[in-house]
């Protein structure tokens, strides 16, 4: 299975042209349809599929449309301290548009890095599990990740009881646009992403 390297994408264009190793041809693929029969999964899949065909809106607008159509009113923001200014504006936008917001910053609790075997510093470690637990306690309907570090976002998503979307990811070098490096992988960033092997 390596869909990223497939040049046919038969799942999108007709399975009659699918290569032999195409996951769409697996015998047990039909059983996954059952997951869409639960009420929450059905609603999320239906609304996101409908919204995916509507163009001309920003990710912020699409997130609010999705939340509204799912009936989500209590929105959690799990944000990185480095994006506190952005989180404040996102909170203002959500509140203005009728949502009840609950936000929690990554440094909540002020935990020492010694907890995970690292040297103590003046800068506390990020605490994504506690971010998730506080939003669980607030009984949010839907949580939005804003700039959590790689791995911290994984822990937040793992422990969040509400569905999660990512509005922004952290990339300090590329103004939080990690695809910039991908678009430049054949030119400016080539040696960084494909370093010469000895």
Image: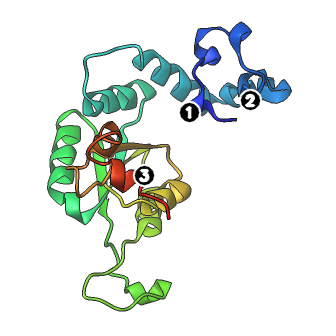
- Tag 1's secondary structure? helix
Please name the residue that numbered disc 3 is placed on: 194
Please name the residue that numbered disc 1 is placed on: 4
CA neighbours of label 3 inside 10 A, class few (<14), some (14 to 19), many (20+): few
Kindly report which numbered mark, 3 or 1, lies closer to the viewer in this rendering: 3
Distance, label 1 to label 2, CA atoms, is 21 Å
Viewer can see residue 77: no
Query: Can you give x and y, in whole percent of width and height, for residue 119 in the image?
Result: 38, 91
Please name the residue that numbered disc 2 is placed on: 32
Distance, label 3 to label 1, CA atoms, is 17 Å
| Left or right: 104, with 39 as reference point | left
**Vertical position of residue 185 compared to residue 154: above or below:** above
- Tag 2's secondary structure? helix
Distance, label 3 to label 2, CA atoms, is 36 Å
Q: Are marks 1 and 2 in contact (CB under 8 Å)?
A: no
Q: Which residue is drawn at 47% across and 64% down?
A: 133
Query: Can you give x and y, in whole percent of width and height, for residue 107 in the image?
Result: 31, 72
> Of the residues under marks 3 and 1, which one precedes in the sequence?
1
Q: Which residue is drawn at 46% across and 62% down?
A: 151
| Left or right: 18, with 172 as reference point | right
- Tag 3's secondary structure? loop
Q: Residue at x 26, y 45 (%)?
A: 188
**Vertical position of residue 107 compared to residue 192: above or below:** below
Which labelled disc corresponds to residue 33?
A: none
CA neighbours of label 2 inside 10 A, class few (<14), some (14 to 19), many (20+): few
Q: Which residue is drawn at 26% across and 82% down?
A: 123
């Amino acid at each position: 299975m390596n869909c990223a390297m497939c040049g046919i994408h038969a799942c999108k264009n007709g399975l009659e042209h699918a290569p032999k190793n195409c996951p769409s041809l697996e015998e047990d693929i039909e059983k996954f349809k059952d997951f869409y029969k639960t009420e929450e999964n059905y609603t999320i899949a239906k609304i996101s599929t409908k919204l995916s065909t509507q163009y001309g809106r920003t990710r912020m607008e699409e997130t609010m449309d999705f939340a509204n159509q799912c009936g989500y009113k209590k929105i959690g923001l799990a944000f990185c301290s480095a994006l506190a200014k952005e989180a404040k504006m996102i909170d203002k936008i959500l509140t203005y548009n009728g949502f009840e917001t609950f936000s929690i910053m990554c440094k909540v609790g002020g935990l020492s890095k010694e907890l995970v075997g690292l040297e103590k510093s003046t800068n506390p470690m990020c605490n994504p599990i506690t971010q998730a637990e506080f939003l669980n306690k607030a009984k949010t309907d839907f949580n939005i990740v804003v700039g959590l570090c790689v791995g911290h976002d994984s822990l937040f998503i793992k422990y969040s009881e509400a569905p999660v979307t990512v509005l922004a990811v952290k990339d300090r070098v590329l103004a939080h646009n990690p695809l910039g490096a991908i678009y430049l992988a054949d030119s400016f960033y080539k040696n960084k992403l494909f370093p010469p092997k000895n």
